[in-house]
Image: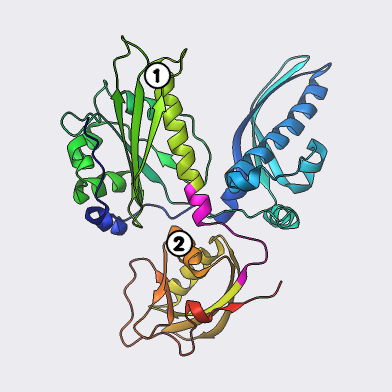
Amino acid sequence: MRFHCVVFGLLLGLATVPAGPGARAASDAFTLRGVRVDITADTAAAAREAAHAQGQAEAFQRLLGRLLPQSELSRMPPLAPEQVVEYVKDFEVADERTSDVRYLAAITVRFNETAVRRFLADNGLAHAETLSKPVVVVPVFGTLEAPRLWEESNPWWAAWATRSPDGGLVPLIVPLGDLGDIGAVDAGQALNGEVEPLRVLATRYGAADVLITQAVQVGDPELGPVSLQVGTSRVGQRQQSTTIETFLQGADEDLPTLYARASEVVAAAVQEDWKQRNLLRPGEARRITVAVPLNGLDEWLKIRRRLDGVAGVQRSEIVTLSRTRGELDISFVGNEQQLVLAMAQSDLDLAFDDTGSWLLRISGATLPAANTAAPGAKAPANSAPVRE
């Protein structure tokens, strides 16, 4: 068996993939949609009340699963449904169906961000809330000699295509496999890390990164249990290593279930890795000063609006402002590398200029002529801790 891994150096060009709409607003991290409830009680009114309480409690558990890494989730203190209400901002109901004793609906719950953050901080729980731009999953089946991608006979693609959305911080998009996808990239191009075909596919779905996951089945199911070897690489905005895992078929497990189980593990690992990279720990507040070169007032307003959606940013205060340049003091939780990554999800570039000063601008925006960073902007080593 030959297992082919993506060469990351060839794929760094994906970092310039023109993503579609920017990342979701930070408040979306605290919104849980489509929580299904089905309650039977003595009366329809009692069933409705119990269902709303249950839906909010389940939504809170899902929220914690979204924000907390596994190590922190295990330390989470239990909460009664009546306690969960303290953290709910509002909720809405859709697809209601009732009988004399039964109530069914889909509930969307929006949680109070400040209250939830305070709850996590009070319990010493580190969390992540940066929403990643969408990631396109490219599930290739087989070795490099005979790979399959868009064929109906690709069980790895079928497993990903039938997954329920996990509602994590990283939206995983499985391509439709239509003519546009088929024309964009084939299995061999994906495994060989050909930049342009992968860029075309990512652009079709408004994504910044591509998750190339290759599954190789070892063994004959007619002769006994098989194993599935899966290599996965997330490529695009940053260089990352390939992970390889082996999944053994259980005694009573059919092949579709094996593939489904493997896809869930891979997807969960993507979410966990993102949370670990964007983990915000209570008390880790810092402050930096950034220069904002401007091509006009509209650009300034866009930057301020996008800053409001950047996870971890607590405050941004104007230091100076002119027609061609602004200067901001930004207070944030986490470290500078996390802030740079969070900014990128809202299509904001935070980086150093030639003088080693922080520069903030809209991704892809043209830098005004003769515009340099504000004197005194602080580098990471000199960023100021903020007492809380």
Please provide the residue range marked out in magenta: 273-285
| Disc 1: CA contacts within 10 A as few (<14), some (14-19) or many (>=20) | few
Mark 1 belongs to which amino acid?
Pro
Q: Identify the residue at image location x=50%, y=79%.
A: 381
Mark 2 belongs to which amino acid?
Leu
Quadrant of residue 53 in the image? top right
Q: Earlier in the sequence, mark 1 or mark 2?
A: 1
User: Helix, strand or loop at disc 1?
Assistant: helix
Point out the image quarter for the N terminus.
top left
**Which residue has dot 1 on it?**
256
Q: Position of residue 374 (x, y in %)?
A: 45, 87
Q: Identify the residue at image location x=43%, y=82%.
A: 357
Q: Position of residue 248 (x, y in %)?
A: 41, 24
Q: In the figure, 335 relative to 106: above or below?
A: below
Q: Position of residue 388 (x, y in %)?
A: 71, 71
**Which residue has dot 2 on it?**
341
